[in-house]
Image: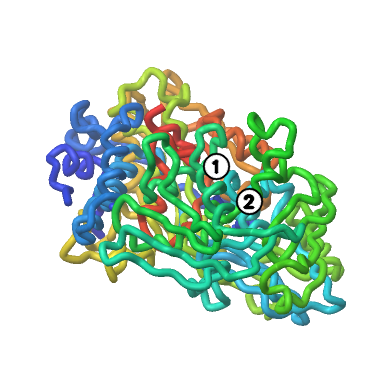
Amino acid sequence: MKKFTAISLALVLALGSLTACGSTQEPADTSSSSAAASTEGAAETTEAASTEAASAEGTVDPANWTEYDNLISQIKSTTDYVEREALMHQAEDMLMETGAILPLYYYNDIYMQKSDVTNIYSNLYGFKYFMFAEAPDTTLRINLASEPDTLDPALNSSVDGACMIVNSFAGLFTYDADGNLQPDLAADYTVSEDGLTYTVNLIPGLVWSDGSELNANDFVYSWNRAVNPQTAADYSYMFDVIAANEDGTLKVTASEDGQSLTIELDSPCAYFLDLLAFPAYYPVKQSEVEAAADWETNPGAWCQEAGFVTNGAYTISSWTHDQTIIMTKNPNYHRADEVKVETIEVMLSADDTAIYAAYNADNLDFIDTVPNDEIQSLLDNPEFHIVDNLGTYYVSFNVKSDLFADKTPAQANAMRRAFALLVDRDYIAENIGQTGQEPANTFIPTGMSDGHGGIFKENDDAYTYPDAEDVGYFNPSYSEENVAEAIALLESAGYVFDDNGMLSAETPITFEYLTNDGTGHVAVAEALQQDFAAIGIDMTIQTVDWNVFLDERKAGNYDIARNGWLADFNDPINMLEMWTTDSGNNDCQFGR
């Protein structure tokens, strides 16, 4: 099978021929990783293959990220959707050329649900909806993850936090049980002929959980709060589609009676209604947010304890940190008559062994993870569910890590791409994931729309993948050819190998891999550790608590870290705009 190598990708980019727009899932345990293919003779590569993978002028430099930032701006402003697709491919090409994103597999999702519990549903983006569930004794007992990082709709960027938020807040739009977008707080809407102005009318009589009026002014406040640099919202960039005033506030206005919202866009946006269903676009109550003593320096302080005001199906009535959250039905929710479960008890834990034991003891009705070594025995269990997701499980490299400190941009890129070629994705998917995950060799997942009626990862008139046979940048299957190419790339970065393809002690490679707990994540880390060790690379594993993990990764306090991204809506821009210099989700530290 032909491979489109890192060398040829760099050449294509240099010639300018490509021109033209977080998860907690656990994969299955294993006692050992893949047996490394023999590397004997791997160093016997051609002279051409051992040359530097990219020339200095042809290399994408992650420290100089202006070109990428400008490309994303161009994608967002173009009205030519065919050109937009080609530009999005170009952006993904740039990401892959840095080597800073090492894709492992494309997500699906697993959970267990008791047979006497019904009407729970999820969508492609990992959100779980419990508000219309039915359960014995009108009480539902669940586990999603450990202590949530935040329950502020503007500040959250984790899937478990989003699941809590979509059940305790409500936005203008939402998703139904079939994954279809539908109005929620919006009664109806209109769009101007040029596609630049949306007018959304609200359902009359909306109130917050404390009984006070909720109206269009709450959306004006909440959205401007999300883009205010003082808030430091990770998702502030998701509001870039809305036109801005000279003072930086958004061109969003409420009618005099507060019953309609007028939104002016910079350019037509085919996925704007999807944005209105995303938690960052949900309203929060101004007086509640600003009642916290330190709200200006700690914008999420208002919702760090139980009792804060919401507008969704549930309120947080009790919160014993790192143990339990109690969610109680909100009688002021606009669909309260459809909510059957009065109380949701949320176990806060990342210990999948303890979680599974609690489920088997009938102390939990729904769990979002199981131990890796239990997956095979559960595949035929009717309470074990495998559902589609749209996202990628991957490894992120901190481009500012000391691991690359003495390397040129071309050498650092070559190192990272070499690591990607050493990984046995088939083993990880089949023996750790175990639920049909597809090995990944690019960042944007299989099945994602191209934004104009097609599929992004399929060749069409707008774009043809550099290698049509593999539809990607390298063959994701583990092979001696990939190992030989990885060694050539590392040699181009100054590393020395012996005749058996083992890294010389005179040029060692040592780094730390950061992950949160969970048997699946640790098993993946151990598989990577063995794949890298096959040529003498020394990787140690550091496991930390979920909240610490999120903070360390976001701050760039790591060399290499486990990562995952579930799409927020079905358009590639979602997985591309997160890597701009100023994005709060730019864990690789591009441009910084």
Disc 1 residue type? Arg
Can residue 536 be seen here? The reply is no
Can residue 263 be seen here? The reply is yes
Q: Position of residue 355 (x, y in %)?
A: 78, 59
Q: Which mark is residue 225?
A: 1
- Element under label 2? loop
Q: Residue at x 41, y 48 (%)?
A: 251
Q: Position of residue 236 (x, y in %)?
A: 48, 43
How many numbered badges does the structure rendering display? 2
Q: Residue at x 79, y 45 (%)?
A: 305
Question: What's the distance in space between the residues labelled 1 and 2, CA to CA?
Answer: 9 Å
Disc 2 residue type? Val
Q: Is residue 361 above or below residue 509?
A: below
- In front here: 199 or 322? 199
Question: In which quadrant of the rendered image does the N terminus lie?
Answer: bottom left
Label 2 near label 1: C-beta < 8 Å?
yes
Q: Which mark is residue 284?
A: 2
- In front here: 507 or 104? 104
Task: Locate residue 543 relative to residue 579 in the image: left or right.
Answer: right
Question: In which quadrant of the rendered image does the C terminus lie?
Answer: top left
Name the residue furthest front. Answer: 256
Q: Which mark is residue 467?
A: none
- In front here: 211 or 431? 211
- Element under label 1? helix
Q: Residue at x 60, y 70 (%)?
A: 204
Q: Position of residue 221 (x, y in %)?
A: 55, 47
